[in-house]
Amino acid sequence: MNIHIFAGMDKPLAPKAAPRRGAVSNATNRFERFRAEAVNDGWDLGEDELPPIRTEVAVDATRTIITRNSSPDVPFDRSINPYRGCEHGCIYCFARPTHAYLGLSPGLDFETKLLAKPDAPALLEKELSNQRYRPAVIAIGTNTDPYQPIERSRRIMRGCLEVLAAFSHPVSIVTKSALVTRDIDILAPMAERGLACVAVSVTTLDRDLCRRLEPRAATPAMRLDAIRRLAGAGIPTAVMAAPMIPALTEHELESILEAAHDAGATGAATILLRLPGEVAELFTEWLDAHAPAKAAHVMGLLKQSRQGKAYDSGWGTRFSGTGPLAELLSRRFHLACRRLGLRDRHVSLDASQFHRPPRAGDQLTLF
C-alpha cells in the first residue's frame, strides 16, 4: 500500500542523488505493511535548506561472529562480517536487502545507519578456542566491506586479523578499500606461511563513474596502488573485475584486468551485475538519475542475461548469467586472463597450521 503525504501537489519527486551517497531514495523495506513515497509539495526547497544526511553507527550485540553457509557455488563455508551496512554506498551492492531484516531501508539507511560489532575479535577467539572447531578458510568481505571508512577508527577488522594470526588460521579477504594496506604488517607474515590472500574489487577505471557508482569507496587509482603494495609485500593478490554492468562498465573488462596485472595482481575473477530484492528498484532509480539515456538499454541487456528478469538466483548462474551476452563476457574474461597469465583468484591456503595458543590460566599439556 502506498501512502502519499503532500500539500497542493501529488507529483512524485524526480530521481535526485544525495551528495556523496549511492542510493537515490530510502524506500520502505519489503517487510513493512505500508510504503511511503516522497512527493513534490510545491515548496521546492534547495539543497542548502535540506538537513545533511549523516552517518550513524550503532553497536550490534551479536553473540557469534562466524557465519556458516552451504551454498554450492561459493568456495567457502564460513565468513565474518565486522559491520552491517556499508558507508561505501555502492548502488549495486547485493547486501543491501539484509538491512530490511533490521527494520531499515536497503536504500540510504544501508549506507548511513551502520552497525559495528566491537566484540568481534573476542567472539572470534572464543569460537576458535572451542575444541569442536575444525579449521577451514574464513572469508571476510563477502557481504559488507570490512575496510569501509569507519574501520579506520573502529579497527574491528584489524582485531579479527590479530586473532586469526595468533591461531594460524587461513583467511581470504575481499575489499575495494585502500585501507587494507594498513594491515600489511599482519597479512604479509601470514601470507608467507600460506595463510592469507586478498582480492581487490575494481568496477571501473573511470574516476567520475566510480564516484557515482561507489561514492565513498577508494578511487580506481588508489585500488590499483593497493594491489601494487599488497603484491609487493608478497601477499597473493587478485582483482575482482566486478560487477560488470552491461552497456556501462563491461566494455572496461580487459582494461581493468590489464591495469591490475601491471600493478602485480596474479589472479582474477568477474561477476555479472546482481540485483536481488530491493536492489533492482534502487539501481533503476540510480540509472534514471545518473544515466537516463542508457537506463532502458542497461536493464534490457541485463534481463536478457537473467531469464528475462532483473535477477535470477539460480545456483550456478547467479554470478555469471546466461545467454549470448553472458557467454561473450565469460569468453572475453578467460581469453584476457590467459593472455595476461592471470589464474583463478582463489588461492589454496593452509589450514593444517591451525593451533590454539595457550591463554592465561590454561594448564600446560604434559604430552
Image (cartoon, helix red, strand yellow):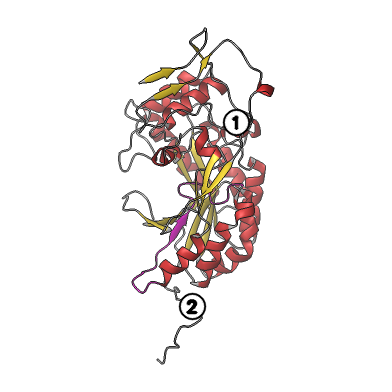
Residue closest to the far top: 8
From mark 1 to mark 2, how far is it between C-alphas? 46 Å
Q: Circle 1 is placed at which residue position?
A: 212
Q: Residue at x 53, y 37 (%)?
A: 90
- Compare residues 202 and 151 and report the one nearer the observer: 151
- Compare residues 112 and 295 and report the one nearer the observer: 112
Determine if residue 351 is in view: no
Question: Secondary structure of the magenta portion, mostly?
Answer: loop
Q: Relative to 98, say whether 364 is above or below.
A: below
- Compare residues 31 and 186 and report the one nearer the observer: 31
Mark 2, Cα crowd under 10 Å, few <14 / some 14-19 / many 20+, is: few
Mark 1, Cα crowd under 10 Å, few <14 / some 14-19 / many 20+, is: many
Q: Relative to 233, say whether 302 is above or below.
A: above
Q: Please state if 20 lies on the left or on the right of 104 as rendered.
A: right
Locate the C terminus and report the quarter of the image it occupies.
bottom left
Q: How many marks?
A: 2
Residue 328 among magenta residues? no
Residue 135 among magenta residues? yes
| SS state under label 1 | helix
Report the magenta residues as a range: 130-149
Residue closest to the far bottom: 366
Image location (x, y in percent) of residue 172:
48, 58
Determine if residue 11 is in view: yes
Q: Circle 2 is placed at which residue position?
A: 357
Amino acid type of disc 2?
Pro
Amino acid type of disc 1?
Arg
Write down the quadrant of residue 229 in the picture. bottom right
